[in-house]
């Protein structure tokens, strides 16, 4: 079984992921933000080893090589992270989200152990492209070890999920965990397909190549840079107009995508 110490270690890790500055995308209302260090755009690829125990108690291993988070798969990974965050986040009556105290986490962990394991399996399966049946016999030790590795290797993915989780509740002042409407929300807001179309047109490459082979950070920073070049050019053209014409033309935004550091994130969440 997963131990109480291990589940609290996960809680502590999730509370500290914002310390990593790998960039991730934040959508708030109609605005796009890239949060983090825009120079950290390298594609991340990692190897994982899972252990399984059959009915006879025999332990076997299966290796997964060069696993990464592509723009096409990003939302399918974030959705199961939402359910995982329910275990570690407390939603106040005003919609504010704060880390759960350890005793609350342990109460959920003990009373809903099977559900907690299912939520973890869903996250691991989403990252490694495995269905629930494939993870049925994974050992608890391997399951928690792999989740730890995923949080360490891809904190930006967990950061993105955490930020949207908070925005969804703070804006709507929900008092219940996300339901199926949140899944629809994210499917409809798949900005990465649009970004790939835009960047692909500029670079004269197939959008599918971007969606399947680029990293998420690489796409959002590239899109933000190219899009801002375009919008800033439009802004300068508007700025050069005479006063009478300016009154007739809507003032364009100089930058369509805002770049912010992690330290500035708390101000965007207000």
Image (cartoon, grey):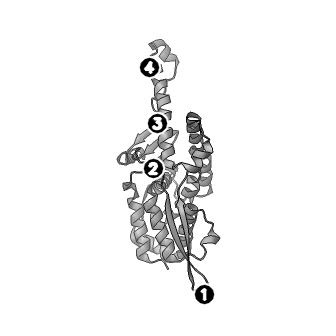
Are the residues tagged 4 and 2 within 8 Å (C-beta)? no
Are the residues tagged 1 and 3 within 8 Å (C-beta)? no
Instruction: Give the Cα distance between marks 2 and 3.
Output: 16 Å
Q: What residue would you read off at disc 3?
A: 225
Dividing the picture into quadrants, the one containing residue 59 is bottom right
Foreground disc of the pair 1, 2? 2
Pointer 2 local density, CA inside 10 Å: few below 14, some 14–19, many at least 20 = few
Pointer 1 local density, CA inside 10 Å: few below 14, some 14–19, many at least 20 = few
Foreground disc of the pair 1, 4? 1
Foreground disc of the pair 3, 4? 3
Residue that appears at 49% across and 34% down: 226
The answer, for residue 32, to whether it is visible in the render is: no
Instruction: Give the Cα distance between marks 1 and 2.
Output: 43 Å
- Across and down, in percent, residue 150 comes to 48, 63
Instruction: Give the Cα distance between marks 1 and 3.
Output: 56 Å
Instruction: Give the Cα distance between marks 4 and 2.
Output: 36 Å
Q: What residue would you read off at disc 1?
A: 56
- The relative height of residue 64 versus residue 206 in the rendered view (above or below) is below
Are the residues tagged 1 and 2 within 8 Å (C-beta)? no
Residue that appears at 46% across and 36% down: 225
Instruction: Give the Cα distance between marks 3 and 4.
Output: 21 Å
Mark 4 or mark 3, which is nearer the start of the sequence? Answer: 3
Mark 2 or mark 4, which is nearer the start of the sequence? Answer: 2
- Across and down, in percent, residue 171 comes to 50, 48
Secondary structure, mark 4, is helix
Mark 4 or mark 1, which is nearer the start of the sequence? Answer: 1
Q: What residue would you read off at disc 2?
A: 42
- The relative height of residue 93 versus residue 189 in the rendered view (above or below) is below
- Across and down, in percent, residue 254 comes to 45, 29
* Left or right: residue 3 compared with residue 187: left
Q: What residue would you read off at disc 4?
A: 239
């Amino acid at each position: 079984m997963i131990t109480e110490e291990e589940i609290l270690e996960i809680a502590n890790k999730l509370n500290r992921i914002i310390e990593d500055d790998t960039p991730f995308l934040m959508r708030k209302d109609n605005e796009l933000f890239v949060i983090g260090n825009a120079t950290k755009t390298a594609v991340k690829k990692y190897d994982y080893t899972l252990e399984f125990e059959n009915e006879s108690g025999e332990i076997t291993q299966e290796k997964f090589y060069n696993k990464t988070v592509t723009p096409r798969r990003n939302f399918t990974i974030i959705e199961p992270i939402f359910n995982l965050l329910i275990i570690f986040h407390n939603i106040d009556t005003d919609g504010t989200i704060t880390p759960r105290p350890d005793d609350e986490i342990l109460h959920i962990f003990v009373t809903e152990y099977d559900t907690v394991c299912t939520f973890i399996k869903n996250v691991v399966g989403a990252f490694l492209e495995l269905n629930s049946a494939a993870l049925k016999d994974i050992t608890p030790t391997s399951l928690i070890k792999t989740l730890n590795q995923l949080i360490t290797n891809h904190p930006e993915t967990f950061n993105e999920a955490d930020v949207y989780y908070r925005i969804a509740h703070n804006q709507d002042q929900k008092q219940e965990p996300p339901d199926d409407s949140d899944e629809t929300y994210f499917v409809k807001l798949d900005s990465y397909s649009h970004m790939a179309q835009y960047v692909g047109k500029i670079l004269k490459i197939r959008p599918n190549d971007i969606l399947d082979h680029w990293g998420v950070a690489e796409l959002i920073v590239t899109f933000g840079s190219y899009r801002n070049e375009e919008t800033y050019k439009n802004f300068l053209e508007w700025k050069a107009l005479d006063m009478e014409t300016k009154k007739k033309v809507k003032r364009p935004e100089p930058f369509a995508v805002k770049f912010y550091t992690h330290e500035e994130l708390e101000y965007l969440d207000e």
